[in-house]
Image (cartoon, rainbow, N blue to C red):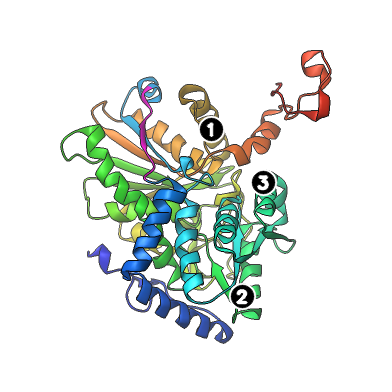
Amino acid sequence: MKPYAYPDQNGHFGKYGGNFVSETLSHAIEELKEAYAHYQNDPEFIREFNYELAHFVGRPSPIYHAARMSREMGGAQIYLKREDLNHTGAHKVNNTIGQALLAKRMGKPRVIAETGAGQHGVATATICARYGLECVVYMGSVDVKRQSPNVYRMKLLGATVIPVESGSKTLKDALNEAMRDWVANVDNTFYIIGTVAGPHPYPMMVRDFQSIIGKECIEQMPKHLGSDKQPDAVIACVGGGSNAMGIFHPYIPFENTRLIGVEAAGEGLDSGKHSASIQRGQPGVLHGNRTYVLQDDNGQIIETHSVSAGLDYPGVGPEHAWLSDTKRAEYVGITDKEALDAFHYLCRTEGIIPALESSHAVAQAMKMAKTMRPDQSILVNLSGRGDKDIGTVADLSGADFYCRPSCRGESVKGGQVVEFKR
């Protein structure tokens, strides 16, 4: 197997990937392929991309040894790649910078994006504000409600946020609407896709921009482990799969490092209420590429469920499908309850509030660590911070998000947020 040979010139990862788009988009896709083929090796493009990562994003992001968690699990040492410390609070900004630089060079003044948890939308709005580009973000109305802090952040940054009311009103439907917009405005619009899905070259392009995560880890981990050692396992959550592919891809040649993707098992893999596309899906075509898709016997997309909006998607990036079939990566499920428990545990043992998406990866690390030796190590991609999820977690925990006079027995002026009350 030669992993760096993928995808082929037609965008295929084995039998997955490809370019399944309408004729109206074929020219835009070809234009994008040509632009990326030119600029991905252009010294000035690379220089500007690396400058922005260092001075705007704050890279490299550190690796943190979760020492207390490791002691309490009683097994492997757990390390966290702190993508939550990036500007905008997640890994998404790595990719949006790369694509926005392409948009500028291609003369596209208008940018559209889809978002689920809102982090990709915030990152896109942020870089559009920096570069003076018009920004329109599509977001399922269900996600607008459960991710309201990020909706407001996007609006503060000058973006137009369009709630999507069709279908399940989540990420899949936001992507559908963004595709329709692109068809209607292809001449002046650049579509910044947020994950390693979509028609070629998006899965490859997003992976390449996000691979900075894994490249940094390969340099950083020996400083923690000694000599030239790398972790025994690398774990990341998988919805579409950009944060996972960003850390996995540079590690593919390291055969002694297990790659473990964590899908949202929701209320259970056999409950029908989950988003585990690889474990419970079948090969099909979704959003311009062939991959594993959650579908019924007639090939119709079925509704998904996850407590985390960013994992609530019925497909997965085609490179993940290929990694699963070739057994280079393993894919497991973590339930809503397990993710919420891990969320609270990390808050209280390490003082880090993780995104609910990342909490799925943390939960899997906690499970695995107990079965491993103390001289072994696990690296978790902590892909985002949990500010955006505080309201969701409070609701599910039965907490009062806003302090009322009854909270502390005194008046509160201006409805100020003071504390949680269980």
Contact between marks 1 and 3 (CB within 8 A): the answer is no
Q: Which mark is residue 182?
A: 2
Kindly identify which residue carries mark 1: 353
* Residue 245 seen from this side: no
Q: What is the secondary structure assignment of the residue under circle 3? A: loop
Q: Which mark is residue 211?
A: none
Q: Dot 2 surroundings within 10 Å: few (below 14), some, or many (20 or more)? A: many
> Of 101 and 304, which appears nearest the observer?
101
Q: Residue at x 71, y 27 (%)?
A: 399
Nearer-N-terminus badge (1/3): 3
Kindly identify which residue carries mark 3: 147
Q: Dot 1 surroundings within 10 Å: few (below 14), some, or many (20 or more)? A: many
Look at the picture and state if 418 lies above or below 136: above
Dividing the picture into quadrants, the one containing residue 386 is top right
Q: Position of residue 364 (x, y in %)?
A: 42, 37
Please check the rendered image and state whether residue 22 is part of the magenta-colored stretch, yes or no: no
Nearer-N-terminus badge (2/1): 2
Please check the rendered image and state whether residue 63 is part of the magenta-colored stretch, yes or no: yes
Q: Position of residue 251 (x, y in %)?
A: 28, 51
Amino acid type at circle 1 is: Ile
Q: CA distance from mark 2 to mark 1?
A: 36 Å
Dividing the picture into quadrants, the one containing residue 388 is top right
> Of 252 and 413, which appears nearest the observer?
413
Q: CA distance from mark 1 to mark 3?
A: 16 Å
Q: Which residues are magenta?
A: 60-67
Q: Residue at x 43, y 55 (%)?
A: 52
